[in-house]
């Protein structure tokens, strides 16, 4: 019996897969609320590297991966594909369960697949510094790692609650040379405005995004990097699915179901897009199903509303067509830090709306039960998420501790809060319903 498949360095993919030309419908464009029209590329160039914007809008199906990036990837890629023999025995299932383990990267998750690429292109375009936000610290540590490798400075706005409660990721970012600030911070106008009214504000991902964007907009040589949601970010993650396909070929297998957890949608998309490509080009051996899992505390795909909404609380980002809980969503304090975002990637939302993806939600107690079963049958302690093993859980011990002590509540986000938030958005932008792209 083969327990895992490990590929050679030479088998690290040479191209990323871009889903845009293969979507069932054109992706609704980001809208500028000032002009009420698609946002102009010049405006976006103030925030993002040119090459990343080119990739964001590209209709080429395959985008070459520069050798310098493949060389960095080779530090931990190709990642292993495991057969979950212990879990299968425990479940007494006839199904074969495989998982791709992204926790072997130096920061411990899938996030450096895009962080390294984003740092590389910004370095090539002569930038000196990148800013970003981070929740529990997975994305921030990935970007700190990427910036270090390409000699860029890195400023990370870390949600205050995590900054105070989870110091180890902060220290990891500092080891790699990043500056880490608790958000809301006194470094930006937006941060200061929040602290003035509420000095103890615990922060949120939406607030931290606003601060990181404001910092990039107001400083020369500085751009912003996002860890999920945008097309180019998800595309960089397709190294996962492309490798997984090769690994399954070695085993002469083809999946019936591809499942992954969704915060903004990058790890799941990175895994399933290459199989989706097989499906739409009729190369798939089977009628494959794609299942997205999310927390009941942040039920974007299962309970959110499909509309245009901002990606951040200060409404600095363009309006994106997506399922959303409302950009003023206050996340309940659940432990799957990376999964607490009010929206999801527009590509993923379109595919969910068109019926290509099934979405399910689980509460955090069930997730920790499953994670403990997994750790006891497969040995790896997973990040508290819902499959596709996109990160180890070595910094989540406090959450496991609370789970064992029976102190974890089963959070469920109330539908009334979602409705209230969307009503506010409709009042702010009464013209949103007239945007032609939503279909
Ligand atoms: C380990 C891990 N898994 C999942 C996620 C969720 O993000 P995404 O849906 O973009 O993969 C994060 C985000 O920070 C993460 O760190």
Image (spheres, rainbow, N blue to C red):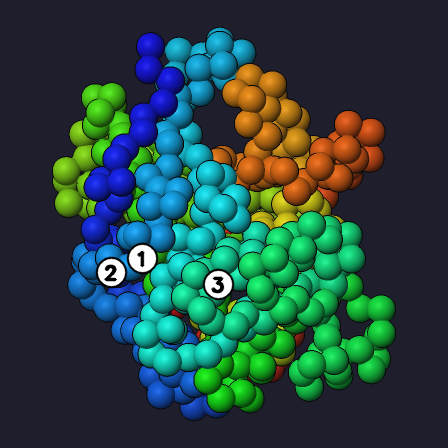
Labelled disc at residue 163: none
Labelled disc at residue 66: 2
Q: Residue at x 27, y 40 (%)?
A: 9
**Camera-side residue of 282 and 53:** 53
Whether residues under marks 2 and 1 lie with C-beta atoms below 8 angstroms apart, the answer is yes
Disc 1 and disc 3: Cα gap in Å? 13 Å
Which quarter of the figure has residue 287?
top left
Whether residues under marks 2 and 3 lie with C-beta atoms below 8 angstroms apart, the answer is no
Residue behind mark 3: 148
Q: Nearer the viewer, mark 1 or mark 3?
A: 3
Question: Could you say whether the residue bearing mark 2 is in a helix, strand or loop?
Answer: loop
**Camera-side residue of 16 and 175:** 175
Q: Quadrant of the N terminus?
A: top left
Question: Could you say whether the residue bearing mark 3 is in a helix, strand or loop?
Answer: helix
Residue 199 position, x and y percent, is: 85, 74
How would you rate the neighbour count of disc 1 (Cα within 10 Å): few for under 14, some for 14-19, many for 20 or more? Answer: some
Mark earlier in primary sequence (2, 3): 2
Question: Could you say whether the residue bearing mark 1 is in a helix, strand or loop?
Answer: helix
On the question of residue 376 being in view, the answer is: yes
Residue behind mark 1: 69
Disc 2 and disc 3: Cα gap in Å? 18 Å
């Amino acid at each position: 019996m083969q327990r895992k498949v490990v590929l050679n360095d030479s088998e690290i993919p040479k191209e990323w897969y871009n889903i845009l030309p293969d979507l069932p419908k054109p992706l609704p464009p980001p809208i500028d609320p000032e002009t009420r029209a698609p946002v102009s590329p010049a405006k976006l160039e103030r925030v993002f590297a040119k090459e990343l914007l080119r990739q964001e809008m590209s209709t080429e199906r395959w985008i070459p991966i520069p050798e310098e990036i493949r060389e960095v990837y080779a530090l931990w890629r190709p990642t292993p594909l495991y057969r979950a023999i212990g879990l299968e025995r425990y479940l007494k299932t006839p199904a074969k369960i495989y998982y791709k383990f992204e926790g072997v990267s130096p920061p411990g998750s899938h996030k450096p697949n895009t962080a390294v690429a984003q740092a590389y292109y910004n370095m090539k375009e002569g930038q000196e510094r990148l800013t970003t936000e981070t929740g529990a610290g997975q994305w921030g540590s990935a970007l700190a790692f990427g910036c270090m490798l390409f000699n860029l400075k890195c400023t990370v706005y870390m949600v205050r609650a995590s900054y105070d409660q989870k110091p180890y990721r902060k220290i990891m970012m500092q080891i790699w040379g990043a500056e880490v600030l608790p958000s809301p911070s006194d470094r930006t106008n937006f941060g200061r405005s929040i602290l003035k009214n509420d000095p103890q504000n615990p922060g949120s991902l939406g607030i931290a995004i606003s601060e990181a964007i404001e910092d990039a907009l107001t400083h020369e040589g500085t751009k912003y990097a996002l860890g999920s949601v945008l097309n180019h970010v998800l595309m960089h993650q397709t190294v996962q699915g492309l490798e997984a396909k090769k690994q399954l070929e070695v085993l002469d297998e083809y999946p019936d179901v591809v499942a992954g957890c969704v915060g903004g949608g990058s790890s799941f998309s990175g895994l399933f897009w290459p199989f989706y490509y097989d499906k739409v080009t009729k190369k798939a051996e089977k009628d494959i199903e794609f299942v997205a899992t999310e927390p009941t505390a942040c039920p974007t795909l299962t309970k959110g509303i499909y509309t245009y909404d901002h990606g951040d609380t200060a409404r600095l980002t363009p309006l994106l067509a997506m399922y959303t809980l409302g950009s003023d969503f206050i996340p309940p304090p659940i432990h799957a830090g990376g999964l607490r975002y009010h929206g999801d990637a527009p590509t993923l939302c379109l595919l969910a709306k068109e019926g290509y993806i099934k979405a399910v939600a689980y509460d955090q107690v069930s997730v920790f039960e499953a994670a403990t079963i997994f750790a006891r049958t497969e040995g790896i302690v997973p990040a508290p998420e819902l499959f596709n093993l996109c990160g180890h859980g070595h910094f989540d011990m406090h959450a496991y501790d609370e789970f064992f002590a029976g102190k974890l509540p089963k959070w469920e986000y109330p539908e009334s809060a979602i409705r209230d938030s969307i009503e506010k958005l409709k009042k702010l932008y009464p013209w949103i319903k007239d945007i032609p792209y939503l279909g």
